[in-house]
Image (cartoon, rainbow, N blue to C red):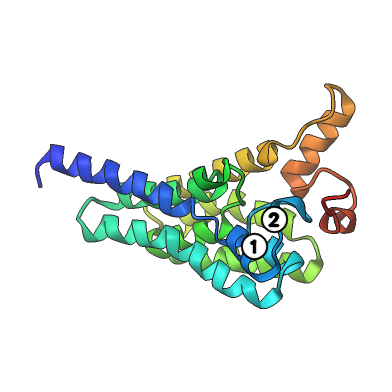
Amino acid sequence: MPAASAALQSAALIVAAYLLGSIPTAYLAGRWLKGIDIRHYGSGTVSGSTIYEQVARWAVIPVGLFDVAKAALPGWLGLRLGLGQPVAAAAGLAAAAGHNWPIFLHFVGGRGLGCFLGVLLVIFPWGIPWLLGFLAAGRLLGSSAEWALASVALLPPFTYLVGGSPVAVWTGAAMLLLTVAKRLEANRRPLPPPGPERRRVLLRRLVYDRDVASHEDWLNRKPSS
């Protein structure tokens, strides 16, 4: 394939992946199933976890599967078209970025874990049980946010140690950057004025993925609050 044609196909695939990732599945499920805007409930993230807590527990399955697929499909196409693993990884990560910052929802999105699973399905399948194992442990212990962060933070060294490709290692590092950026940005929620409280809020966002100390209070937020 000529270099110019491959570059054009790669760019088109990455842009299309971002747009596919921007489809706000969880938001649509909240509207269709319960008539609510999930951005104003609980954590406010446009994700399967908010659907689980605020809409219907069964709905997390189709929402989660779609989130996985919208990152796996562009990555698979990248390989199928012969564009190489780096382009496949970039396309999957573009879908994850679209999920986190969806153009169709004013860039208010989720955290990208479902999309990360889709990327790993194509690039590094051994990363799937790694992430799912951490998430299961977090669910059992009632502290999933910390375990989710740990799973992504430790994914690059795990990938390297088990012989994953350099592209897979760097893909894991990119996932960590997306995770940290999204947690700190927190869908543009306002921060306290500069000082100790702002630092505490930023630390809570990074580690616990919330602004307040109480997990229960965070999950029970409603528009009136």
Q: Residues within 10 Å of mark 2 (few under 14, many from 20)?
A: some
Q: Nearer the viewer, residue 1 or 24?
A: 24
Res 31 label: 1
- Give the image location of residue 91, x and y in percent: 37, 49
User: Residue 165 appears at what percent x and percent y?
Assistant: 37, 53
Mark closer to the chain start, 1 or 2: 1
Q: Residue at x 28, y 55 (%)?
A: 78
Q: Secondary structure at mark 2?
A: loop
Q: Give the amino acid at mark 2.
A: Asp
> For numbered disc 1, what is the local secondary structure?
helix
Instruction: Residue 133: tell me if it is visible.
Output: yes
The reply to whether dot 1 and dot 2 touch (C-beta < 8 Å) is yes
Which of the numbered marks, if any, corresponds to residue 202?
A: none
Say whether residue 105 is left or right of residue 37: left
Does the rendering let one see residue 168? no
Residue at 20% x, 57% y is 81
